[in-house]
Image (spheres, helix red, strand yellow):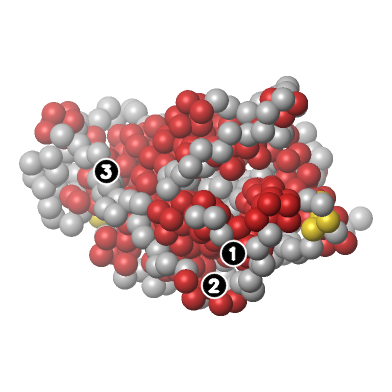
């Protein structure tokens, strides 16, 4: 499942204090208004409860999409290039300074938010805006895929629509981060905050592509659908028939899974190279995604082998998949044995509760869900092998040499191109702004007013009464 990225917040800024234009004087003011809408949308999202945030994501995406053309226009015009086929003169009065709260950086103390950082320059502002749009696309994909894990199992058509929409959004996130890497000012930003450093952006792009490859055939995976049916309490089909498992292109699916594992492995290496500056949960997620993808590939190799009549070899592939996932392979009549099995069952139930209550589910990158699929097949095949086929189960180590190389499901991911201002929109900016008009700063409080240690409202204070809790200027006592 896509990683549950936290969206950053930002401080308000008057862009006309940093940029001026003789040819298009309304450009800095209009860009300020668009940016203030983005700041407001991000702040409202942060204040909403977990279950209510999904409805805000589309609003944030629209606000970012509306702001990016004006931000690109400022960036292009300040580099003495034409905008919309017209010459736009923009003078940099002073370097842009704005604060963004980093969300991928490791917090200084457990339980604390990552600090706000001051970024200087229009190129870093553009990097944070584009990265935020990538986060939003991944979160929208999570919202689509969440329906596949609901208590009521979706129909085949609903699964196909959800997977198709999520895959499109993940590919767009990949394209956004790739576009960000293509900007010379970003690829050379070695001293930027770790959230927007080239290595981090490249890792995020690889993760999005790995996830898009991994779910590409999810609606055609009958084994995952059969396990999902077991969570539907209203499903009574098990009383009179077994799940229908049609033949699948198992060998092709396996190679796609191993290709996704390669992308996840690349992302994991890049994230670990940050030297402890990134949140450990993101690094762990990348590693779990690699393991899940490899285990899924082994499972499909087992399916391909079982269809060929080699049940013993197929069971060996399943045991290798469980080993890759990091779970015990001890089974007793299809049930787990020992404390490891008990712990795994408890962790799976906890993950199910997170899905039901809207918590931060999916941090395991689908590892527990894949373990359920593998164990379902293992119990079924071992029963058949002990009663019908009676084949010896070989060790998994020699079979690992037969793992095929990965292949790309999306051989040429679509290139993302941002919207730009057309000639008509650029011409409308030639009108001088009203001298009495100030840029819209938003209805939400500034991100810089958020409470931090030693600043802001005390814990438990009623909003707007922070001044009543302050110490007098003549007192130096804490009591």
129 relative to 158 in the view: left or right:
left
Picture coordinates of residue 243, whole percent (x, y): 63, 34
Distance between mark 2 and mark 1 Cα atoms: 9 Å
Picture coordinates of residue 441, whole percent (x, y): 45, 35
Quarter location, residue 359: top right
Picture coordinates of residue 245, whole percent (x, y): 56, 38
Label at residue 399: 2
**375, 308: nearer the viewer:** 308
Picture coordinates of residue 234, whole percent (x, y): 73, 22
Q: Are marks 2 and 1 in contact (CB under 8 Å)?
A: yes
Mark 3 or mark 2, earlier in chain: 2
Quarter location, residue 256: bottom left
Location of the C terminus by quadrant is bottom right
Distance between mark 3 and mark 1 Cα atoms: 50 Å
Distance between mark 3 and mark 2 Cα atoms: 46 Å
370 relative to 303 in the view: left or right:
right
Mark 2 or mark 1, earlier in chain: 1
Q: Residue placed at 39% from the left, 32% from the top?
A: 62
77 relative to 116 in the view: left or right:
left
Label at residue 313: 1
Q: Residues within 10 Å of mark 1 (few under 14, many from 20)?
A: many
SS type, badge 2:
helix
Q: Residue placed at 59% from the left, 64% from the top?
A: 313
Q: Can residue 335 be seen in this view?
A: yes
Mark 3 or mark 1, earlier in chain: 1
Q: Do the residues labelled 3 and 2 touch (CB within 8 Å)?
A: no
Q: How crowded is mark 2: few (under 14 residues within 10 Å), some or many (20 or more)?
A: few
SS type, badge 3:
loop
Is 9 placed above or below 463 here?
below
Label at residue 418: 3
């Amino acid at each position: 499942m896509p990683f549950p990225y936290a969206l950053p917040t930002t401080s308000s800024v008057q862009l006309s204090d940093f940029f001026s234009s003789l040819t298009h004087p309304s450009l800095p003011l209009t860009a300020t208004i668009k940016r203030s809408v983005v700041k407001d949308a991000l702040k409202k999202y942060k204040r909403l409860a977990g279950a209510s945030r999904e409805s805000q994501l589309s609003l944030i995406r629209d606000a970012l999409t509306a702001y990016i053309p004006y931000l690109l226009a400022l960036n292009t015009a300040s580099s003495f290039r034409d905008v919309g086929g017209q010459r736009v003169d923009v003078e940099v009065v002073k370097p842009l300074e704005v604060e963004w709260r980093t969300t991928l950086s490791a917090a200084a103390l457990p339980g604390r938010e990552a600090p706000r950082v001051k970024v200087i320059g229009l190129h870093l502002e553009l990097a944070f805006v584009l990265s935020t749009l990538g986060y939003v696309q991944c979160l929208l994909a999570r919202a689509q895929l969440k329906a596949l894990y609901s208590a009521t199992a979706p129909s085949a058509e609903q699964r196909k629509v959800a997977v198709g929409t999520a895959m499109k959004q993940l590919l767009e996130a990949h394209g956004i981060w790739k576009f960000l890497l293509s900007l010379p000012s970003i690829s050379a930003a070695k001293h930027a905050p770790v959230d927007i450093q080239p290595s981090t952006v490249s890792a995020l792009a690889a993760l999005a592509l790995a996830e898009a490859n991994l779910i590409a055939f999810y609606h055609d995976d009958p084994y995952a659908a059969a396990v999902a049916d077991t969570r539907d309490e209203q499903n009574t089909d098990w009383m009179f028939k077994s799940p229908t498992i049609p033949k699948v292109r198992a060998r092709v699916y396996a190679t796609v899974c191993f290709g996704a594992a390669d992308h996840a492995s690349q992302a994991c290496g890049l994230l670990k190279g940050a030297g402890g500056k990134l949140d450990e949960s993101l690094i762990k997620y990348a590693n779990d995604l690699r393991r899940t993808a490899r285990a899924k590939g082994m499972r499909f190799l087992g399916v391909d082998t079982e269809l060929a009549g080699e049940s013993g070899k197929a069971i060996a592939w399943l045991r290798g998949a469980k080993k890759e996932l990091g779970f015990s392979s001890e089974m007793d009549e299809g049930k787990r044995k020992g404390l490891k099995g008990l712990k795994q069952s408890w962790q799976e139930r906890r993950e199910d509760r997170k899905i039901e209550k809207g918590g931060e589910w999916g941090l395991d990158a689908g590892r527990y869900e894949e373990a359920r699929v593998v164990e379902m097949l293992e119990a079924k095949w071992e029963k058949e092998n002990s009663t019908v086929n009676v084949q010896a189960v070989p060790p998994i180590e020699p079979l690992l040499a037969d793992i095929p190389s990965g292949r790309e499901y999306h051989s040429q991911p679509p290139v993302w191109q941002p919207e730009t201002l057309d000639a008509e929109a650029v011409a409308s900016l030639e009108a001088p702004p009203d001298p009495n008009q100030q840029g819209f700063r938003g209805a939400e409080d500034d991100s810089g007013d958020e409470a931090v240690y030693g600043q802001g409202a005390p814990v438990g204070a009623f909003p707007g009464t922070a001044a009543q809790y302050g110490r007098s200027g003549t007192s130096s006592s804490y009591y």
